[in-house]
Amino acid sequence: MTQSLHYKKYAKNYVAIDSIIFGFDDGKLKLLLIKRKFEPCMGQWSLMGGFVGENESLDEAAYRILEDLTGLSKVYLEQLYTYGDVERDSEARVISVAYYALIKINDYDCELGRKHGAEWFAIDDVPPLVFDHRKMVDRAMSRLKRKTIIQPIGFELLPEKFTIPQLQKLYEAIHQKDLDKRNFRKKILSMGVMQKLDEKETHTSKRGAFLYKFDKDKYDYLMSNGNMFDFV
Amino acid sequence: MTQSLHYKKYAKNYVAIDSIIFGFDDGKLKLLLIKRKFEPCMGQWSLMGGFVGENESLDEAAYRILEDLTGLSKVYLEQLYTYGDVERDSEARVISVAYYALIKINDYDCELGRKHGAEWFAIDDVPPLVFDHRKMVDRAMSRLKRKTIIQPIGFELLPEKFTIPQLQKLYEAIHQKDLDKRNFRKKILSMGVMQKLDEKETHTSKRGAFLYKFDKDKYDYLMSNGNMFDFV
DNA sequence: TAATAAAGTGTAAAAATAACACTAAAAGTA
DNA sequence: TACTTTTAGTGTTATTTTTACACTTTATTA
């Protein structure tokens, strides 16, 4: 696209993306952070980010940056909020569009991560972060809490096959409170989007728990008929 | 702020604000739109917008632009979403941060509005809009629906003193469905944030309805003690 | 074969929501 | 002045949703 005739009197700005990347492992909700390898704030912990290119949309930039770090291309990614305080970046005026991603932690490419100096941190053990990244994390956390109540995006953090106790632990980690397992099971099954498999997961218990899959077709069907996903 | 040393290899972009401005009048939810007085798309209906200056934050830019059009400075304004498709503006690559505002329609400065070619449109009678502004309106509508359930921002659209039937009509307009007046009254009063006055409003009915004010102190107190505002 | 550890199951009380119809007040009119 | 009109205001019951709560099952390991 050529230079603008009518807009040329206006200022232009650097526009960046920052991504809050959530994972779930070991019963804990985790964040993927990188140690900055460039100035300003080199060596400090930071969200993964990058600048928006001239010929990519914001969503495209966010996917590109996420894939650079994790090797993953088909993940849940949602725009969160845009941060534009004049002094938010110590180097220049940078407007940052924050996204949050939910990834299946086992699919993540550790080798790529190592190259970027990336590490996983439990959500309540996050180190100090550069600029306003802490505010971004807090906003992502509260969005995730709200969103997992009204949309079945929690599944994005689990392997394709998972047990009900695993799913419950995930919800407990996100909402930071214990849930009653009978009520949990009743509610999640009553929504009719859990597809029970004939296999069991036998690592975490002697008895073993049945594996389930999220039935996306059924979910889409229910939604299109006006049914709401609604969960605590 | 001076030019950046470390970021200079990256592209810069025009960053704009667009505002979805809601009002409530005559039992209807309305939008304030302007007829564009400049290219591109001169003469077409559009949201009020403007470019972000070098020394103002996004919020500051949004307030400035809103005040330019309405003369109002203390209004409810909330960031909605950022639109960044490469071709969204036909003139140049412009990234637009959308905000939505709730204003008391009687406080609005009509003279200023006329200067901008502004007009109010009922929400289900909005004309075709430039660029992706229709998408912005739709997103604002669904945000407003959700938000008025969990936060008492509906009051921002009414005069300081209002009656319960007025408030009910507002909620009906926002949620596009009729509500039972007994259940509505019960619920809104039970939240304990309505301050009953000794005055009546006598224009819309012979009997007259008592006026109320939203008790912000009480609301803040309840919220700080963990109470939730929660409404259909 | 006994101990262990997590999976799995049902019911009853409490709270929230939804449905529903008449009376009260004041103005305008015959 | 009494009758009509119009909107404000009021309680109760049925239904649904949510919460609270304890024992049995299954397979492994000691």
Image (spheres, coloured by chain):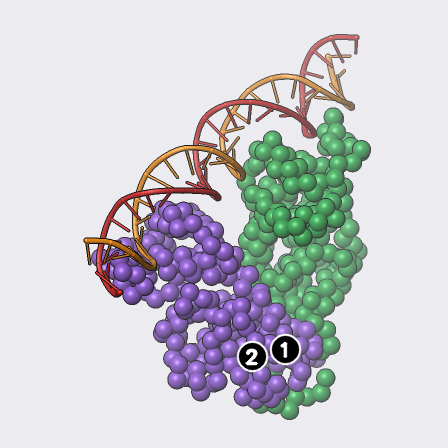
Chain colours: A purple, B green, C orange, D red
Q: Please tell me in which quadrant of the rendered image residue B188 appears.
A: top right
Against B173, is B118 above or below?
Answer: below
Against B2, is B176 above or below?
Answer: above
Q: Is residue B63 left or right of residue A206?
A: right
Observer-nearest of A44 and B18 = A44
Question: Are callouts 2 and 1 both on one chain?
Answer: yes
Residue A138: % across, % down: 58, 66
Question: Residue visible at 74% across and 26% down?
Answer: B206
Residue B154: % across, % down: 66, 47
Question: Residue visible at 39% across and 70% down?
Answer: A104
Res A87 visible:
yes
Res A216 visible:
no
Name the quadrant of the N terminus of chain A: bottom right
Question: Residue visible at 58% across and 33% down?
Answer: B183
Three-letter amino acid code at the position of disc 2:
Ser
The mark found on residue A131 in the picture is 1
Few, some or many residues within 10 Å of mark 2 (<14, 14–19, 20+): many
Tell me, yes or no, whether the two marked residues, 2 and 1, touch with CB atoms within 8 Å: yes
- Tag 1 secondary structure: loop
Chain letter of the residue carrying label 1: A
Considering every residue shown, the one lying at the far bottom of the view is B5
Compute the Cα span from label 2 to label 1.
8 Å
Query: Which residue in the protein does label 2 denote?
Result: A46
The mark found on residue B77 in the picture is none
Residue A12: % across, % down: 65, 80
Q: Is residue B32 left or right of residue B140?
A: right
Against A16, is B64 above or below?
Answer: above
Q: Is residue A139 left or right of residue B120?
A: left
Observer-nearest of B223 and B25 = B223
Three-letter amino acid code at the position of disc 1:
Phe
Question: Residue visible at 77% across and 59% down?
Answer: B73
